[in-house]
Image: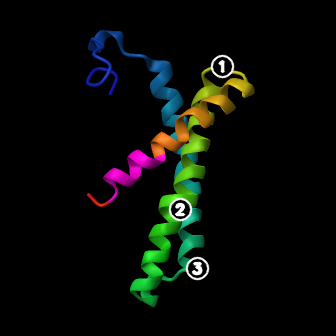
Amino acid sequence: SQTAFQGKNVLEFDIKRTLRNGFIGLCFGPLVHEYYQFSDSILPPEDGLVTRLEKILMDQTIYLTIKCSIYISAVGLLSGDDFATVKQTVKDKIVGIVFTAWKFWPL
């Protein structure tokens, strides 16, 4: 992504960014697994269409907002930002992220 989206040369690769995001991903894996175990226990997918729609609604509102807020916070804190800056960054970005996710979700 650094070379494709930021236009950086391959030789300008930011190893700290890669390690930071790798660490965050490593932490998120078990948390995401636990979330889906929990959501399956309260909204079993085999219970039909209405339950599946409820699960999608929960995923695309509560879960999406919490997961993205934690991710933004982790990136900021691991980059050296103070808590107040991280909190403001989450407030500034979360609504746009959620609406963008909703645009792409059906795809």
Q: Are marks 1 and 2 in contact (CB under 8 Å)?
A: no
Residue that label 2 marks: 33
**Which quadrant of the structure image shows residue 49?**
bottom left
Decide whether the magenta segment is chiefly helix, strand or loop: helix
Helix, strand or loop at mark 2: helix
Segment colored magenta: 98-105
- The amino acid on which the numbered mark 3 sits, given as a three-letter code, is Ser
Residue that label 1 marks: 80
**Residue 40 at x, y percent in the picture:** 53, 76
Residue located at (57% from left, 36% from top):
72
| Quarter of the image where the N terminus is located | top left
Q: Is residue 5 above or below residue 67?
A: above
**Which quadrant of the structure image shows residue 83?**
top right
Residue that label 3 marks: 41
Left or right of 5? Residue 69 is: right
Q: What is the C-alpha distance between the residues marked 3 and 1?
A: 38 Å
Mark 1 or 2, which is nearer the eye?
A: 1
Given residues 63 and 95, the one toward you in this image is 95
Given residues 47 and 25, the one toward you in this image is 47
Q: What is the C-alpha distance between the residues marked 2 and 3?
A: 12 Å
**Residue 53 at x, y percent in the picture:** 43, 76
| Quarter of the image where the C terminus is located | bottom left
Q: How many marks?
A: 3
